[in-house]
Each structure stands twice: as structure tokens, then as C-alpha cells.
Image (cartoon, grey):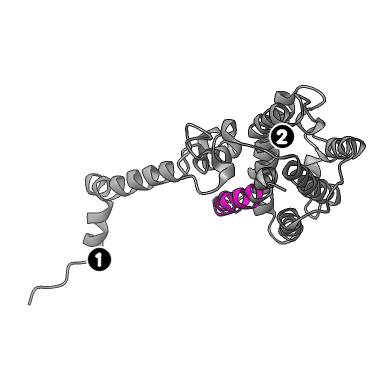
């Protein structure tokens, strides 16, 4: 019976330079490639990762990077929309509830870094209050908040306390979507039902691009303190954010 190979020889085999390279390099290369596929925008900062994921959830009608199939009326290109006055009012009321909730969450700051997002210039509650008052002066009855807005506001309240990474996902998507696609919606509504009047909801005091950049920088700074798992969790919340925001947006197209 042959004597067992000494342990020292096993050690030598796996510590020999050429063989070690053979065993290790393919694994390292595969791991790096998989990480690159999972987080293709990671090198540009976490906000760019959030943007990348969000754009994939648009339809081709909405954005060239979009991959989602159209399943709801608000997912069509804005140029095809037929907004209604009643629906738009419901949308504004529910939007105000959502933005009121966001601003209160940031003001109360259950987590210290929420306070970084106070007074960014992106706040919309005051602008929405002015718009609703204008509609009231035109003789319109302002409705109470409806299910989409109530549901989203309550979800944000709960999330902000128990799941800060997921909350930040919603914060980012709500404000940045409104500053981009939201302005297109505002223009369409103005053309169709408001005699070209652009509402305060779609106006900002100061340079919007700079305000957005300031918030991007703060978001990236906050995310630097997160683990990769926490970042992934934030990104995974994007679909939920789109679903809830879409239900509020859909109100614009309601006939009454």
C-alpha cells in the first residue's frame, strides 16, 4: 500500500505560482464580470445605478432605454394622452398628499440623513396648494384624496421608519420623475385643458438642473455608507415605486 502523500506536498501543489493562477483567475474574472452585469452603472455613483434601473422600467414609448411592455394607459407616450379636468384635479390632490408626506418625513427625520434632503428646492407642496386654490377660484370643487394617493402616502410613512433604503428609492424616483417626465405631462395638460396655462406644480424657483445635481450629490454621499446588500435592496424597490406612482398618475386620464 502506497504511503499517503505528505500534507506538506499538498500545500506545495496549491501554493505553486502557476497552478494557483490557473485555479484562481477564472473565478475572479467571472465574479468581476457578474458584478459588472448586476451593477453596470456602479462606477458612476449610486444615483446613476438608480437611474439605470428606473429607465429599464419605462416603456419604449416613454424612453429609448425602456424595456417594459405597455400595460396601462399612462405608460403610453404623453403625446397620446387625453387628460380630463376632473381627472387632473384628482391627480393634483393625490399628488399633494404624497408630497406633503415626503416633506413631513424629511422634516421629522426618523433617520438623521433624511435631514440632508430638507429645503432642496424640489419641494412641491406649496406649489400644489397654489394650483388647487386657482382651480377653486375658477369654480371647481376640489375633491378629497382618493385611494391611490392615500395608499402611497401611508406606505411612505411606514417605509420611512422601518426601511430607510427603500424609502430613499421612492424619494429619488418621485422627485426626479416629476422634474423630467412630469414637465412633459404639465405641458400636455396645459395644451389640452388649460388654454396653455402652466401650473405652479411644473415650475421651480431657481435653476432646476443645479438643484437636481445637489440632491444627486447628497444621495450619493448617503449611499456611500450603505453595504452592497443595502444598495441592492434600494434598487429592488424601484418597481414598487413605479407601481404606486403610476396609480396616482393614471388619475389624469380618468373621465370624471
Q: Mark 1 points at which residue?
A: 7
Q: What stretch is highlighted in magenta?
A: 227-246
Is 36 or 246 nearer to us in this picture?
A: 246
Question: Measured along the vertical axis of the image, is residue 105 above or below residue 158?
Answer: above
Which residue is depicted at the point 57% across and 36% down? 48
Q: In the drawing, what numbered circle is on residue 215?
A: 2
**Percent of width and height locating residue 149:** 74, 53
Main SS of residues in magenta? helix
Crowding at mark 1 (Cα within 10 Å: few <14, some 14-19, many 20+):
few
Question: Measured along the vertical axis of the image, is residue 80 above or below residue 110?
Answer: above
Which residue is depicted at the point 69% across and 52% down? 167
Q: Alpha carbon of mark 2 to alpha carbon of mark 1: how far? A: 58 Å
Question: Measured along the vertical axis of the image, is residue 217 above or below residue 17?
Answer: above
**Percent of width and height locating residue 8:** 25, 62
From the viewer's perspective, tell me whether residue 32 is left or right of residue 204.
left
Which residue is depicted at the point 80% across and 53% down? 145
**Percent of width and height locating residue 64:** 48, 31
Crowding at mark 2 (Cα within 10 Å: few <14, some 14-19, many 20+):
many
**Percent of width and height locating residue 47:** 61, 38
Is 130 or 188 nearer to us in this picture?
A: 188
Q: Quarter-wise, where is residue 183 in the image?
A: top right
Which residue is depicted at the point 78% across and 41% down? 116
Q: Is mark 2 on a helix, strand or loop?
A: helix
Image quadrant in which the N terminus is located: bottom left
Is 3 or 75 nearer to us in this picture?
A: 75
From the viewer's perspective, tell me whether residue 206 is left or right of residue 61.
right
Amino acid at each position: 500500500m502506497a504511503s499517503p502523500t505528505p500534507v506538506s506536498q499538498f500545500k506545495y501543489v496549491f501554493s505553486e505560482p502557476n497552478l494557483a493562477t490557473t485555479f484562481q483567475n477564472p473565478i475572479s474574472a467571472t465574479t468581476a464580470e457578474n458584478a459588472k452585469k448586476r451593477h453596470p452603472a456602479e462606477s458612476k455613483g449610486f444615483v446613476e445605478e438608480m437611474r439605470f434601473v428606473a429607465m429599464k422600467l419605462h416603456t419604449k414609448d416613454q424612453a429609448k432605454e425602456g424595456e417594459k411592455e405597455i400595460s396601462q394607459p399612462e405608460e403610453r407616450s404623453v403625446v397620446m394622452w387625453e387628460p380630463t379636468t376632473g381627472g387632473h384635479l384628482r391627480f393634483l390632490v393625490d399628488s399633494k398628499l404624497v408630497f406633503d408626506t415626503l416633506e413631513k418625513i424629511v422634516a421629522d427625520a426618523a433617520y438623521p440623513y433624511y435631514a440632508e434632503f430638507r429645503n432642496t428646492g424640489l419641494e412641491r407642496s406649496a406649489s400644489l396648494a397654489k394650483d388647487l386654490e386657482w382651480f377653486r377660484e375658477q369654480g371647481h370643487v376640489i375633491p378629497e384624496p382618493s385611494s391611490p394617493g392615500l395608499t402611497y402616502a401611508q406606505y411612505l410613512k411606514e417605509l420611512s421608519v422601518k426601511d430607510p433604503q427603500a424609502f430613499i428609492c421612492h424619494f429619488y424616483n418621485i422627485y426626479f420623475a416629476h422634474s423630467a417626465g412630469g414637465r412633459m405631462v404639465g405641458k400636455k395638460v396645459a395644451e389640452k385643458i388649460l388654454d396653455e396655462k402652466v401650473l405652479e406644480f411644473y415650475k421651480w424657483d431657481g435653476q432646476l438642473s443645479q438643484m437636481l445635481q445637489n440632491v444627486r450629490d447628497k444621495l450619493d454621499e448617503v449611499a456611500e455608507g450603505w453595504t452592497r446588500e443595502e444598495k441592492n435592496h434600494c434598487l429592488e424597490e424601484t418597481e414598487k415605486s413605479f407601481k404606486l406612482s403610476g396609480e396616482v398618475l393614471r388619475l389624469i386620464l380618468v373621465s370624471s
